[in-house]
Image (cartoon, grey):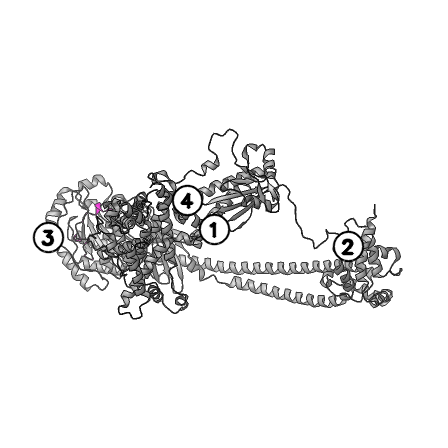
């Protein structure tokens, strides 16, 4: 056995031969520097540098500074560098920590100072609010109390008996009280306790004492504080029969409530005030009612009532006031001593020493208690009034102004804990001056009110600023500046030290640039051992000799072997199965489709495969065009990779069949005819590709290697040998198999049978084959898209069906060929049609239903011929639709960016002779393609004429099949059940005539054998394109349009002859079979 060191030595000598060419003077200089004491001192001084050795690794080979001390130098440099970096890190951490600490401290100090100022200001302003409300309550109640005293005094002096008391000059006195208290209205309510008094009151007293009404109206006219309407209807008895009777009497201002007079309304029946009167009658206290113009959830009040109250408020405050603000009434009970009251019933109900004989109701807006509360500059104090009856409303104070913010509590929840609250009765005792009110106390039994005060964000912003952030940022900036100065100084020091270290690093750079790290470390270790053995003053060994000795030493890794760096890294997976899946007939199918349709098919199919792969644990490699490549067994190995891949292939095939059938509705004919070729191999990828290319459509073709793995996995019942061997490129003849996953004793159909079954709903087929049913739906969708454009254009032109019945021409026995026009006049360009994007792009449900049913009926009109059948008509329809989409203007039209959309559309209209701007023309072309072979007998026209068939005699031997198709389809369209469809297609008689002309010319154009029609078309062509002088330009343009339309459907009728070879073969074979069948039938 050869010595591995000898082989290693041969490789090493090869390397050394190249290295020996280094300048010999460099070696001598290294030896001299090694023995130099001064150089050793310089070398030792470099130990104190903080420069990383790696910073100079790429330096060119230097003059050398003692190779034996390289490892010590690098070790010391590394240690020192770590120490310096550690101190740098410590300093940075200290600076960062100090900066953060100072910033946080400054931030919180300034923030707390601002918060303290904010809270102190809020407390001060809250005190002002409560004192203002208390002072206002004191003044208002004192004024009302004084007024009540004057009323009672008058009754005593004049010896009047309650309730028959009417105060002279009531309006004059009330207006002064109203001006002093800012009350909205003052109303006196009399309490009538027995039926006798009530009869006298209603029958005579009210009418006899209405003089105060005119007195009040006169005062209103001169009252500068009143800005409301002045009107008062005559009193009409209200017919109220309730037991409690508390009619309104004298009031100021004198204003009606709705259509009722301002007096003699029974307030005990009021939804708001009646409850307050009843609840507080026994208390003999001033009671505040609920808010009159706010509806509570527990109150059965209609919006009309609240609206009436607000209208009543508007009469008082005028249109400039805020009539919808919360309005309450202070009910001040007028009491008289029982000794003066000759009412026995009251003594039983009220055993006190006094009796309630009347109520002085004073209405206030809560806003009146808050005016002029804060000094100018103070904004954002929120005041919430709320009572125990569930009512709440909010005001905001901005200086001297008070703004109503609405019902319910609107204060910011963030300031909830800062809120302060007092009851209204408590605030009455907070009056700052000498209390002037000494009357009845405020009631706390019925819906007591509370006043809560909160700050708001607006108020907070007056005391909060950006100072905390600014001061903190300033502190951080100072520390950052200090850190930058420190880092700049450190950088200068590092640059200086790097220059000192350069000479030491140069020698290390030579080794580092020549060897990988593991070999370099060995060199370092050898040098260290040499230093330990002989000291610095030991014998000198030239560097090249030391390198040669090292390379000749044994090395288990084999220096220079193929496993060294630079070789590609790859893993080998021996247990995996690859699948190639390719769509059969894809090239032919895609040649007749738009790019978007091809993308839709591939995206849908590949997306479905990806979902199956995720479920099965299959690894997708890539997609190449219509080819899908996947593998099992990597990146995670698995033993059942072959069986999993076969199951995956079966799932892909089954889903592909289902997906293509569903997509045929949107992608058109022949989509469901696409198939999938699947090839599987457990091993090399190219063999799997051979399995796919030599496979059969919708069969899982597997190699022998995969078949063996399936047998080992007890899946032999899945495998069926292929009868013939295949010739694989680079492989020769191969025995292959077909796989079909299924259970051992399955009685169900195999997948090869299942893929032939339909998946479209049977209830839509109506007896048609599944494929024809899908084509029916696709044709209906295609026609619907064009019909939507027709309806859009009609709407854009502001034209709708004018109500006049459109008479559709009767086919009967008419000669359709006689209706062929030399020129079909298309409508002129209309720019308004370009706004059609703003209109709905969906047909009405009834129209769509009739359209689908019509196409279904047309499909049943087609005979089961091999060529002239509904499938061929669908193929022609698809070609017409595609050609229409290809009619575009030259590029130069769209290069002029300055042109408006209207200009581009106009130019496009002219370039296409008006076809592109008339949706009805496009619809007629597609419609004609669909019906052009209805009831075709499968025999040429010439043969029908020759045989003297009945249909040939009917149409006088001229374009027999074509005329018959037009009449059948037109007669079907005239059926009453398609009325909505006809109205959608043609909205006027003119449109019906043009549609008829287009259909007749287009269908008749498919008869290319009739000599008369051919001569007409040739003459039209010459007149359209070979005439030098044109007298009627519009007629000439429409003549060209007629030529284009006829040639478009002619080309589509034989489009298969210009498409992919497979398409050509398919339809020519069918035509041959049709002619053969006709021949065999005689």
Q: Alpha-carbon distance for marks 4 and 2?
A: 66 Å
Query: What residue did someone put label 1 on?
Result: 587
For the residue carrying disc 2, how many other residues have a C-alpha within 10 Å: few (<14), some (14-19), or many (20+)? Answer: some
Horizontal relation, residue 90 to residue 352: left or right: right
Mark nearest the camera among 2 and 1 is 1
Query: What residue did someone put label 3 on?
Result: 208
Mark 3, secondary structure of its residue:
helix
Q: Which one is earlier in the sequence, the residue at label 4 or at label 1?
A: 1
> What span is in magenta?
253-271
Q: Which one is earlier in the sequence, the residue at label 2 or at label 1?
A: 2
Residue 269 magenta-highlighted:
yes
Q: Which one is earlier in the sequence, the residue at label 4 or at label 2?
A: 2
Q: Alpha-carbon distance for marks 4 and 3?
A: 92 Å
Which residue occupies the extreme bottom position in the image?
1029
Residue 692 magenta-highlighted:
no
Residue 859 in the image: above or below residue 431: above
């Amino acid at each position: 056995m050869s010595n591995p060191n000898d082989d290693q030595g041969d490789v090493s000598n090869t390397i050394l031969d190249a290295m020996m060419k280094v300048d010999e003077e460099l070696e001598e200089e290294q030896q001299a520097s090694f023995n130099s004491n001064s150089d050793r001192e310089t070398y030792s001084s470099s130990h104190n540098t903080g420069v990383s050795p790696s910073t100079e690794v790429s330096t060119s080979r230097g003059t050398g500074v003692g190779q034996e001390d390289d490892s010590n130098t690098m070790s010391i440099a590394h240690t020192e560098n770590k120490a310096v970096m550690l101190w740098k890190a410590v300093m940075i951490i200290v600076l960062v920590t100090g900066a953060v600490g100072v910033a946080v401290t400054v931030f919180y100090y300034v923030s707390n100072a601002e918060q303290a100022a904010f809270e102190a200001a809020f407390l001060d302003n809250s005190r002002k609010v409560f004192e203002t409300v208390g002072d206002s309550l004191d003044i208002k109640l004192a004024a009302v109390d004084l007024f009540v005293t004057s009323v009672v005094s008058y009754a005593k002096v004049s010896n009047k008996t309650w309730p028959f008391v009417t105060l002279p000059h009531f309006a004059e006195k009330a207006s002064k009280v109203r001006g002093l208290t800012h009350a909205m209205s003052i109303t006196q309510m009399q309490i009538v306790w027995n039926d006798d008094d009530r009869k006298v009151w209603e029958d005579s007293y009210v009418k006899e004492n209405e003089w105060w009404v005119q007195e009040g109206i006169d005062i209103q006219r001169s009252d500068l504080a009143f800005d409301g309407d002045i009107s008062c209807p005559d009193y009409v008895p209200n017919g109220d029969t309730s037991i409690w009777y508390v009619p309104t009497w004298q009031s100021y201002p004198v204003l009606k409530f709705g259509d009722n007079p301002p007096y003699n309304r029974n307030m005990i029946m009021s939804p708001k005030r009646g409850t307050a009167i009843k609840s507080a009658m026994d208390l003999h206290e001033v009671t505040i009612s609920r808010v009159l113009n706010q509806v509570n959830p527990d109150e059965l009040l209609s919006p009309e009532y609240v609206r009436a109250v607000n209208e009543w408020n508007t009469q008082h405050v005028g249109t400039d006031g805020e009539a919808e603000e919360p309005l309450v009434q202070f009910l001040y009970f007028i009491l008289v001593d029982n000794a003066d009251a000759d009412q026995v019933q009251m003594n039983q109900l009220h055993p006190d020493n006094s009796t309630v004989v009347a109520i002085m109701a004073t209405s206030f807006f809560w806003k009146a208690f808050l005016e002029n509360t804060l000094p100018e500059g103070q904004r954002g104090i929120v005041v919430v009034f709320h009572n125990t009856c569930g009512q709440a409303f909010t005001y905001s104070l901005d200086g001297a102004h008070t703004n109503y913010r609405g019902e319910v509590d609107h204060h910011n929840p963030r300031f909830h804990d800062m809120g302060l609250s007092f009851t209204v009765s408590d605030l009455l005792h907070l009056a700052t001056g000498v209390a002037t009110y000494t009357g009845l106390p405020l009631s706390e039994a019925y819906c007591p009110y509370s006043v809560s005060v909160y700050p708001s964000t607006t108020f907070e912003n007056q005391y909060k600023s950006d100072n905390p952030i600014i001061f903190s940022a300033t502190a951080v900036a100072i520390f950052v500046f200090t850190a930058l100065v420190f880092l700049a100084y450190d950088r200068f020091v590092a640059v200086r030290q790097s220059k000192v270290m350069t000479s030491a690093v140069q020698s290390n750079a030579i080794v580092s640039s020549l060897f990988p790290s593991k070999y370099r470390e060995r060199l370092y270790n050898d040098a260290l051992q040499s230093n330990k053995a002989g000291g610095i003053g030991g014998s000198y060994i030239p560097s090249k000799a030391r390198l040669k000795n090292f390379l000749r030493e044994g090395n288990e890794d084999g220096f220079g072997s193929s496993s060294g760096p630079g070789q590609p890294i790859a893993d080998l997976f021996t247990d995996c199965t690859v699948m190639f899946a390719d769509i059969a007939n894809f090239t032919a199918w895609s040649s007749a489709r738009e790019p978007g349709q091809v993308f839709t098919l591939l995206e849908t199919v590949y997306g479905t495969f990806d979902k199956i792969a995720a479920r099965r644990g299959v690894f997708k490699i890539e997609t190449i065009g219509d080819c899908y490549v996947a593998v099992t067994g990597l990146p995670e190995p698995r033993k059942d990779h072959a069986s999993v891949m076969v199951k995956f292939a079966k799932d892909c095939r089954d889903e592909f069949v289902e997906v293509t059938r569903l997509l045929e509705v949107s992608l058109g004919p022949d989509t469901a005819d696409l198939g999938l070729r699947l090839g599987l191999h457990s091993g090399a990828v190219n063999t799997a590709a051979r399995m796919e290319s030599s496979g059969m459509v919708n069969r899982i073709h597997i190699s022998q290697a995969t078949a063996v793995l399936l047998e080992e996995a007890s899946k032999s019942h899945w495998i069926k040998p292929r009868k013939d061997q295949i010739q694989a490129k680079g492989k020769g003849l191969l025995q292959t198999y077909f796989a079909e996953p299924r259970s051992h004793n399955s009685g169900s159909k195999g997948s090869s049978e299942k893929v032939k079954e339909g998946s479209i709903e049977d209830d839509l087929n109506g007896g048609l084959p599944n494929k024809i049913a899908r084509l029916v739906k696709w044709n209906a969708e295609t026609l619907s898209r064009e019909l939507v454009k027709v309806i859009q254009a009609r709407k854009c032109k502001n034209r709708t069906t004018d109500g006049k019945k459109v008479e559709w021409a009767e086919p009967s026995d008419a000669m359709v060929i006689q209706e062929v026009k030399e020129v079909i006049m298309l409508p002129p360009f209309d720019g308004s049609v370009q706004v059609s994007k703003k209109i709905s792009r969906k047909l009405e449900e009834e129209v769509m239903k009739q359209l689908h049913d019509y196409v279904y009926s047309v499909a049943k009109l087609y005979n089961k011929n091999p060529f002239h059948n509904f499938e061929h008509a669908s193929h022609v329809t698809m070609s017409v639709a595609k050609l229409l989409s290809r009619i575009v203007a030259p590029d130069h039209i769209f290069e002029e960016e300055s042109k408006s959309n209207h200009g581009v559309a106009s130019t496009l209209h002219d370039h296409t002779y008006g076809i592109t701007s008339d949706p009805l023309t496009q619809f007629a072309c597609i419609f004609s393609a669909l019906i052009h072979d209805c009831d075709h007998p499968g025999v040429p026209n010439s043969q029908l004429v020759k045989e003297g068939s009945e249909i040939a005699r009917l149409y006088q031997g001229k374009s027999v099949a074509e005329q018959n198709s037009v009449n059948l389809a037109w007669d079907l369209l005239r059926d009453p059940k398609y009325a909505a469809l006809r109205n959608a297609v043609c909205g006027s008689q003119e449109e019906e005539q043009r549609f008829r002309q287009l259909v007749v010319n287009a269908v008749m154009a498919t008869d290319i054998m009739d000599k008369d029609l051919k001569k007409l078309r040739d003459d039209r062509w010459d007149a359209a394109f070979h005439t030098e002088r044109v007298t009627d330009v519009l007629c000439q343009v429409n003549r060209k349009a007629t030529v284009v339309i006829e040639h478009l459907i002619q080309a589509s009728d034989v489009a298969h002859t210009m498409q992919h070879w497979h398409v050509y073969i398919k339809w020519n074979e069918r035509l041959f079979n049709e002619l053969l069948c006709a021949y065999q039938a005689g």
